[in-house]
Structure formats: structure tokens, C-alpha cells
Image (spheres, rainbow, N blue to C red):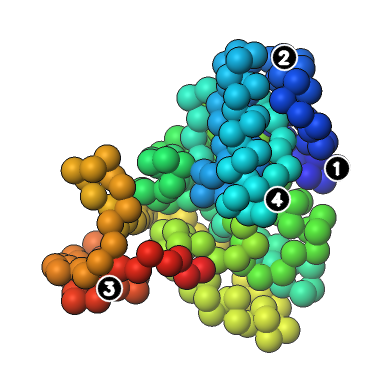
Amino acid sequence: MAEAGVSTVPGHMGLIADAAEAVSIAKEIGYPVMIKASAGGGGKGMRIARNDAEAHEGFERSKSEAASSFGDDRIFIEKFVTDPRHIEIQLIGDSFGTVLYLNEQECSIQRRNQKVIEEAPSPFLDAETRRAMGEQAVALAKAVGYQSAGTVEFIVDNQRNFYFLEMNTRLQVEHPVTELITGLDLVELMLRVANGEALPLGRDEVKLDGWAIESRLYAEDPYRNFLPSTGRLTRYRPPVESADPGLVVRNDTGVFEGGEISTFTIR
């Protein structure tokens, strides 16, 4: 990513032998640091360290959690960005070398590093930062020859400095907010690209019209500190869908009243 001209968080990306080396690296970067599982996702294998003791313990815990969750105990350390926002750029690329960024999705409202609220456009970005982030996302995708829909995630500080976090090479749950502000059907575009077709529009044709918000519903028990809650879904009353241009309401769901919430995850 650095070679492609993408802003990256200061850190150490090489293999770390043990907790003592982790502490040495953390001190060199400067506290606070984020200790993260290389193969991680969903907030697993992540620890913030603000001193040597937390770096030592955090490395051991992250390594153990990474091994059990992903079968890969590799850990990296990077600078922890204070007052962060989680903002990602939606993009799509075809087999003819065209990559378009379709504006952004902000996913800063989270619990346990799991996204809860997503919105587009971000209320924090200005036009200049949006363009800079979009252009870097496009450069990243072109550097790896990426085709189809994907998102490039950035961490953004309170001065609108942004740093590459990861790329999701798939369609994400939050893609409807982008569809609603651009008027584009991302699934259709993915299928057309997969069929060998060229993207039917240019960057200057990508709209940014209106504002959209998505709320994820989790199977959790708020009376037990939001622990996972499985079993029968006894009552489910989603909001009434609406195609009114002034207020579109859309439900994307895979559950139904009377159905079972399983202990297993299907991805």
C-alpha cells in the first residue's frame, strides 16, 4: 500500500518473535499503540497498549486469541490513532482497468469493534478529503489489479488525517447506504463486471444525492451486557418499507418471526 502511495499508519509489519520484542517495538513507535492479529477481523485479537506492561500482556493475549480464532498467531503493531473515525471508500473496478470510487461510508459507531450504525455520506468529511481518500483507494485497487466491488477502510483522526486500515474484497453489509446516495445497484454492477463488461459510467457521473443511514440489528441481550442471545425469535417487527423518494426505507434481512437464531455464523 505504501508503494502505491496510500497513507499508512506508522508501525511495525514484520514478524514479532516474543513479548519482549513487542515492548521494544511499541516504545520505538510511541505509545499508545494498537496490537493486532495479522489474520484478524471483527475486533478479535486486538489490544490497545499505553505502556510497557500493557504491551507485554496485550501481545500475549492477542497472539493466543489470534491462534484460537484464525489458526494464525502472527501479530503486528501500529500507532493507535486517538479520537478515530472509521470511514471506508466504496469502489468498483472492471477488467479494462477502470476503477471508480463511489464516495464513502462512515462506520464509527461501534460496540466491541463491531459496526452498529453506518451512514453515507460521512458528516465529518469535506469534499477535499473525500476526493483524496477516493483517489488513494483507486490507486490501491489498481496496484493489485482489483476487479469487482470492494471497500478500502481508513482510520481518520480529528484533523482529517487518514490512514489505510484494510481492504474488503467483497460486498459489505453496509453497501445499501452507498446505493441510496448514488442511485447505483452495486450487485448489478458486480455481475456485469464478472460477465466481462465495462463499467457503464465514469467518475464524473457518480452522484452524491441525499443521506442514508443503516442500523444493524444484533441478536444480543442488553440486560446481560449485550452477550450473544440465541434461540427462537419470538417477535420481529421490522419497519415498513417505503419507496417514497423523500424517505426510502429498506429492509435487508435473513431472519423471520418464529425462526431460530443459531450459535453458528454463516459468512
**Residue holding disc 4:** 72
Please tell me which residue lies in front, 254 or 158: 254
Q: Which of marks 2 and 3 is in front?
A: 3
Residue type for callout 2: Lys
Q: Residue at x 60, y 24 (%)?
A: 57
**Residue holding disc 1:** 3
* Residue 33 higher or lower than 93, as above or below: above
Q: Which residue is drawn at 56% across and 31% down?
A: 47
CA separation, marks 4 and 2?
A: 25 Å
Q: Where is residue 131 in the image (x, y as percent from the top left)?
A: 62, 44
* Quarter of the image with the N terminus in it: top right
Q: Nearer the viewer, mark 3 or mark 1?
A: 3
Point out which mark residue 260 bears: 3
Q: Position of residue 214 (x, y in %)?
A: 34, 56
Identify the image quadrant of residue 107: top left
Label 1 CA crowd tier, 10 Å (few <14, some 14–19, many 20+): few
Of the numbered discs 4 and 3, the one sitting upstream in the chain is 4
Residue type for callout 3: Glu
Of the numbered discs 3 and 1, the one sitting upstream in the chain is 1
Label 4 CA crowd tier, 10 Å (few <14, some 14–19, many 20+): some
In the rendered image, is residue 24 in sight?
A: yes
**Residue holding disc 2:** 27
Q: Residue at x 27, y 73 (%)?
A: 260
Please tell me which residue lies in front, 67 or 119: 67
Horizontal relation, residue 97 to residue 169: left or right: right
For the residues labelled 2 and 1, say whether their Cβ atoms are less than 8 Å apart.
Answer: no
- What kind of element bears circle 1? loop
For the residues labelled 4 and 3, say whether their Cβ atoms are less than 8 Å apart.
Answer: no
